[in-house]
Image (spheres, helix red, strand yellow):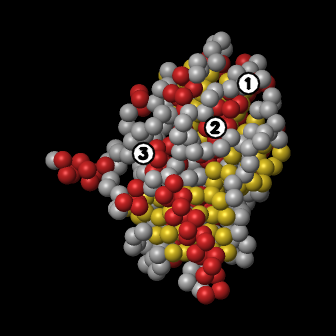
């Protein structure tokens, strides 16, 4: 039986920082319950560690350099989705697509294919929609977890992720983030309650995911694991998605999974693979960054045991976006993140060095491994027609400047 309704919930900037993923000090009971009712993908990654490119991949099943969104999509950056959004794909299959909350993949949301769009992501409007008889595709994008964070709770217990310094400033920011996550969790729970009240939960496929890693230094906007790791929870009572799923998956795999569950043909050009029965995990994850605050092109391959990053330009060792620079963790020691980038290639042994601190590139004892991973990365770039192969990528602002 195909899923009657498709419900996709996302939130900003938290990676896998949820209780069900092992963040013991985070309060997220509704999403923990969703994980118990369905499948929790413990090693899900995004295609890009920034909002617009990753969200575009989620909505199209294609890498950023194949969907048009190689950088931020808001005014002044102007990257534009140039392939069909999930809303259009589902609309063409007879679904009514509706958006609640913001979208961050185009300056022209009217082109995405939604029947209606509401900035209000609370459950009231969703409840009224669920009372209709239509077959629905509903996308809900929460913004509670985006910086700036609310005031932290007094005397909060905080678990500091190991990639961050365990300093008072980091603890303060994480305590504030935990308040934001708890509020987002309640909002997601209200959506799930609305689905239950409608009587449609039993034959709906529900996804909760995040756009990229934590909005913290050396996470968001980097190709290190803290920037690429995402939560991915899928519940479909009629399907076979259960328990913890340990295989490596990419967020380009979400759309084909939803389409298969709904009995909709997967369009040509979709690069992801369905995660339903018969679907397999990936031997390697590929990810990219081209633009965020500035041009900083890099590509990576991540296997079960190693990661290779190729940096195509000079720059700081890590990009720290402006909202993170305004935070106390960065300001406590900016020099920690402002060193120059010393090498074109970075190679990490993820088993021996999970925090990706020791770059092995260039060492004789890993020469064969480095060559093999490098060739696999180049092959992926060729197979997907990566524009970097033709030279530096021009931004929309550059093209506009050349025309005026």
In the rendered structure, find residue 2 and report the number of the disc placed on it. Answer: 1
Is residue 283 visible to the viewer in this orientation of the structure? yes
Q: Earlier in the sequence, mark 3 or mark 1?
A: 1
Quarter occupied by the N terminus = top right
Is residue 196 visible to the viewer in this orientation of the structure? no
Q: Is residue 111 above or below residue 68?
A: above
Closest to the observer: 215 or 307?
307
Q: CA distance from mark 2 to mark 3?
A: 19 Å
Residue at point 42% right, 51% down? 71
Q: CA distance from mark 3 to mark 1?
A: 31 Å
Q: Earlier in the sequence, mark 2 or mark 3?
A: 3
Q: Marks 3 and 2: in contact by CB < 8 Å?
A: no
- As helix, strand or loop, the secondary structure at mark 2 comes to helix
- As helix, strand or loop, the secondary structure at mark 3 comes to loop
In the rendered structure, find residue 68 and report the number of the disc placed on it. Answer: 3
Q: Is residue 188 above or below residue 3?
A: below
Q: CA distance from mark 2 to mark 1?
A: 14 Å
Q: Position of residue 109 (x, y in %)?
A: 42, 32
Relative side of 145 to 204, left or right: left
Q: Marks 1 and 3: in contact by CB < 8 Å?
A: no
Q: Is residue 89 above or below residue 176?
A: above
Q: Position of residue 61 (x, y in %)?
A: 57, 42
Q: Position of residue 110 (x, y in %)?
A: 41, 27
Relative side of 240 to 301, left or right: right
- As helix, strand or loop, the secondary structure at mark 1 comes to loop
Q: Residues within 10 Å of mark 3 (few under 14, many from 20)?
A: many
Q: Position of residue 193 (x, y in %)?
A: 73, 27
Residue at point 32% right, 55% down? 394
Q: Residues within 10 Å of mark 1 (few under 14, many from 20)?
A: some
Residue 285, by quadrant, is bottom right
Q: Earlier in the sequence, mark 2 or mark 1?
A: 1
The residue indicated by pointer 2 is 256
């Amino acid at each position: 039986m195909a899923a009657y309704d498709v419900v996709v919930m996302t939130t900003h900037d938290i990676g896998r920082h949820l209780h069900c993923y092992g963040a013991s000090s985070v309060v997220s009971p509704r999403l923990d319950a969703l994980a118990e009712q369905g499948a929790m993908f413990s090693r899900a990654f995004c295609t890009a560690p920034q909002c617009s490119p990753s969200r575009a991949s989620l909505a199209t099943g294609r890498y950023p350099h194949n969907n048009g969104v190689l950088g931020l999509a808001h005014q002044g950056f102007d990257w534009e989705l140039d392939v069909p959004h999930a809303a259009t794909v589902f609309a063409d299959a007879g679904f009514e697509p509706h958006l609640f909350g913001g979208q961050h993949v185009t300056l022209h949301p009217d082109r995405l294919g939604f029947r209606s769009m509401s900035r209000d992501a609370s459950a009231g409007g969703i409840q009224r929609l669920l009372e209709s008889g239509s077959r629905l595709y509903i996308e809900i994008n929460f913004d509670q977890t985006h910086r700036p964070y609310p005031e932290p709770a007094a005397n909060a217990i905080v678990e500091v992720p190991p990639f961050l310094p365990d300093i008072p400033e980091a603890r303060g920011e994480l305590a504030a983030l935990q308040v934001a996550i708890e509020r987002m969790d309640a909002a997601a729970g209200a959506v799930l309650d609305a689905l239950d009240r409608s009587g449609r939960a039993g034959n709906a496929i529900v996804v909760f995911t995040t756009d990229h890693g934590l909005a913290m230094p050396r996470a968001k906007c980097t190709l290190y694991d803290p920037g690429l790791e995402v939560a991915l929870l899928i519940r479909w009572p009629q399907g076979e998605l259960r328990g913890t799923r340990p295989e490596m998956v990419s967020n380009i795999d979400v759309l084909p999974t939803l389409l298969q569950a709904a009995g909709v043909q997967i369009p040509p050009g979709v690069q992801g693979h369905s995660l339903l029965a018969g679907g397999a995990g990936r031997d390697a994850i590929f990810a990219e960054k081209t633009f965020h605050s500035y041009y900083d092109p890099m590509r990576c391959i991540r296997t079960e045991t190693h990661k290779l990053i190729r940096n195509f330009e000079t720059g700081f060792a890590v990009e720290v976006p402006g909202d993170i620079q305004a935070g106390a963790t960065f300001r406590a020691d900016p020099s920690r993140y402002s060193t120059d980038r010393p090498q074109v290639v970075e190679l990490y042994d993820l088993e021996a060095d999970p925090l990706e601190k020791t770059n092995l590139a260039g060492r004789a004892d890993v020469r064969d491994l480095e060559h093999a991973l490098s060739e696999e990365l180049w092959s992926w770039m060729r197979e997907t027609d990566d524009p970097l192969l033709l030279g530096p990528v021009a931004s929309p602002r550059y093209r506009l400047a050349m025309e005026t």
